Structures are given as C-alpha cells and as structure tokens.
Image (spheres, rainbow, N blue to C red):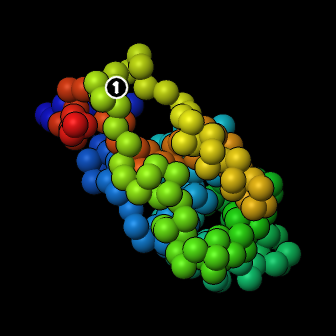
Amino acid sequence: MKPRCWWCGEDPLYCEYHDKEWGVPVHDDRKMFEMLVLEGFQAGLSWITILRKRDNFRKAFKNFDVRKVARFGKADVARLMKDGRIIRNRLKIEAAITNARHFLEVQKEFGSFDRYIWRFTGNRTVRSPNGVTRKTIRPTSPESDALSKDLKQRGFKFVGSTVCYAHMQATGMVNDHVVGCFKYRKRRK
C-alpha cells in the first residue's frame, strides 16, 4: 500500500481523490467553480460526505456550468431543497447560486476566475519549506485570509478563510501532502 496523508484512511473513494486530485494545480474555471461550491457545502461536514454525493451535486448543479447555475431561481432552490441526494441546506444552496453570479463578474473583470484566484499565491503552488505533518498542517494561511476577505467584498458567501484554504489545497494552489506521503514533494529553493 502507498504511504498517503493520514486523512484519507483506506476508503477507496478518498484514496482516489487524494491520489489524483488533491494538491494538483487546477486552471480550469469549471473545475474551480465545482470545488468552490463543494467546499462551501462541506463547511461543518466531512469531506468524504461531499465526495460520496459529488456525482449527485454534478447532476443537481448542471455539471457546475456556472452560467446555468447563475440563472437558477426560486424554483431551482425549491427543487434542490427536495433533492435528498445532495446536502439540503437552503443557505448553502442559495450561496452556490449567488457565488455563480459573482464568479461570472470575476471572470468578466479578470478574463478568467483562474487568473483572479491564482494571484493570491503569486501564480505558483505554495509549499511549506520543510513540509507539513499531521501536527503542523494548518486550517488557514495569510493567503486564504486575503482570498476570503476579497471574495466576501465581492459578495461571495460561505467563503471563510478555512473554506478558502481547503479550496486552495484541493485545487493545488497549496500543496500540503505530508512528509512521508508518496505525493509529497519538497519545495525547490
């Protein structure tokens, strides 16, 4: 068995996510939007809960087509509130729709959401110079604080610093694979 970060345990779905997605740089706006929505829904829950419902979220949110989600209205909120295959939290559902609208505004202003968000890490993947361990991994960073503040000023919801940091880890803006994990790479000087 490959040595992995402790948090994925032995669950095959978690291991696949860890091995193929977590910490891999993302530059696709649709994928960025998907992860932003999923991280928002994850707030207060475990990530494995979200992973197990991910395909259902994709169906419910039109494969995370940001333009389609931005057009969702009251009928869509009502439909999603009845959909037991996803997390039925009205505030999170409404936040996903609000965030889609603001996501489009960011795309218009910067040319892409990717161009906007990667500025917060200097357009590179951030790695701890000495690596991280289970004891030293952190829930936020100065970069996630700045991203959270900026997103909130733009009207985004469910984008606290912890959610933003998790998004940065998930999309490879931060590489927090722990020392000893087969995906760990030491920062180049």
Q: Residue furthest right?
A: 74
- Of 76 and 18, nearer the camera is 18
Residue at 69 percent across and 75 percent down: it is 105
Location of the C terminus by quadrant is top left
Q: Residue furthest top?
A: 135
The secondary element bearing badge 1 is classed as loop
Vertically, is 130 above or below 174?
A: above
Mark 1 sits on what residue? Answer: 132
Residue 71 in percent (x, y) is at 74, 82
Residue 161 in percent (x, y) is at 63, 40
**Circle 1: residue type:** Val
Q: Is residue 120 left or right of residue 126?
A: right
Report whether residue 171 is seen. Answer: no
- Of 20 and 146, nearer the camera is 146
- Of 3 and 185, nearer the camera is 185
Residue at 63 percent across and 80 percent down: it is 108
Q: Residues within 10 Å of mark 1 (few under 14, many from 20)?
A: some
Location of the N terminus by quadrant is top left
Report whether residue 187 is seen. Answer: yes
- Of 1 and 35, nearer the camera is 35
Image-quadrant location for residue 20 = bottom left
Q: Is residue 113 left or right of residue 79?
A: left
Q: Is residue 124 left or right of residue 157?
A: left
Residue at 55 percent across and 65 percent down: it is 116
Residue 117 in percent (x, y) is at 53, 60
Image-quadrant location for residue 145 = top right
